[in-house]
Amino acid sequence: MSFHINMSLMHPGQVRTAWRLPERDPLAWIDVERYRRLARIAERARIHAVFLGDSPGLGTGIASHPEAGLEPTVLFSTLLAGTEGLGAIATASSTYNEPYNIARRFLALDHVTGGRAAFNVVTTFAPAAAAAFGFDGNPTTADRYRRADEFLRVVLGLWDGWDDGAIVGDRERGVFADLERIHHVAHTGEALRVRGALSVPPSPQRRPVLVQAGGSPGGLAIGARWADVIFTAGQDLREAADFRRDTKERAAAYGRDPSQIVTSLGVVVVVESTEREARARQEALVESIDLPAAVLGVAEQLGLEPDRIDADTLLTPELLASATRPPASAGFHRSTVGLVTSSRVTVRELIARSGGGGGHRVIAGTPESIADDLQRWHAAGAADGFTVMPADTGVDFEHFAEQVVPVLQERRAFQREYRGATLRENLGLDALVPGADRFRAAQPELAPAL
């Protein structure tokens, strides 16, 4: 049985210090032609979509490695030009954006790509972002997720505001559009007040695919209620399978068809022709990491005080449960709990096993062994597919697309051709039908255009 594969375009890779290795270009993260080349490679491999994370505001991490680079929707509008099936998953924050702008920007990208765009919604927790947008501090986790839920209600309402047949184009009568078929969102909520309609009709897939990655209780609820795709981390196979099952049960509780919410499990890959070469390059990547900074990052991700752990601290469920503050990443915390419950892992080992402490599992090996691993996790129900994050994008993106994918295709575990024209079709999601839309009843009030 086949599964989806999305691929991250992040430079220099999931190991953020990979730029320090010989023959790496420190400016690759803003080199548009390099991104174009990778998009062409992904299309040839029939990858479902390329993915870019994003975070507004510049933090102090730029001192040691690239942070968020070019704005994803702008970049994807040029990358997908000339492609026919490749999708684009662009990230934007519901905390530091307005729903009207996001709805308009992503629907435009969906039209430009012929229905191959996705909106990965994130709630941003970063002091630099708060300061850049004029706030004294970050909103609380609860406030960020309440705003995100309201934000998505408005975005979906805007995307659904045009009925089929709204464009009349009657030259004789001079009637271009039927105003009765264009509906305004009329929303007044806790955080947002929006009245208006978008200026263009639905795209070829009616609206962009919605992706969500939050692992906190608020994030899980938002994903189950609204998302088409859940992007998640998993270090332990059983925990990942439990998470996927829980996600589908949550979706069913909201009255949704569980088959219409798919999980995409993040994996970091190091691909070489032999196991020895893969291990050697993985070790070189780990050696490029600033270990003290990575330890501080793990402490923040897990909600632990920095003075409680060092590189050789053994992580245990009891230690994680004793955290004095909320973890910066609930998904990272959940996957780490799953890992340390079944394995003895130090902080140093966690950093090595998660590409620098990002939470996603590293698979280093040959094309055949990596294909074996992905098939095993998929068969065990740990994911509906994978978001592949090259450890070193300058090497592993091409190696995966041109070496691992053919193995999976030969085993009939991955597609040889795109099944349809839109990203929604290629992910196996049902077409959206006007008037029978699962979001309609929960969206803001829709009123005829004025």
Image (tube, rainbow, N blue to C red):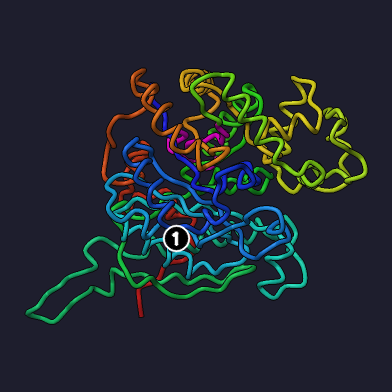
Apparent side of residue 363 relative to residue 90 in the rendered image (left or right): right
Residue range of the region highlighted in magenta in the rendering: 253-269
Please tell me which residue is depicted at 44% across the width and 60% down the height of the picture.
Answer: 73
214 or 292, which lies in front? 292
43 or 87, which lies in front? 43
Residue at mark 1: 73
270 or 113, which lies in front? 270
Residue located farthest toward the left when viewing the structure as drawn: 172
Question: Considering only vertical position in the picture, is 279 above or below 196?
Answer: above
Apparent side of residue 121 relative to residue 347 in the rendered image (left or right): left
Please tell me which residue is depicted at 56% across the width and 46% down the height of the picture.
Answer: 24
Residue 63's spot in the image, x, y percent? 71, 58
Classify residue 46 by image quadrant. Answer: top left
Q: Quadrant of the C terminus?
A: bottom left
Question: Considering only vertical position in the picture, is 124 above or below 347?
Answer: below
200 or 371, which lies in front? 371
Residue 385's spot in the image, x, y percent? 47, 31
In magenta stretch: residue 395: no
Apparent side of residue 216 relative to residue 91 in the rendered image (left or right): right
Q: What kind of element bears circle 1?
A: helix
Badge 1 amino acid = Thr
Mark 1 neighbour density, 10 Å: few (under 14) some (14–19) many (20 or more): many
Residue located farthest toward the right when viewing the structure as drawn: 307
Residue 259's spot in the image, x, y percent? 43, 33
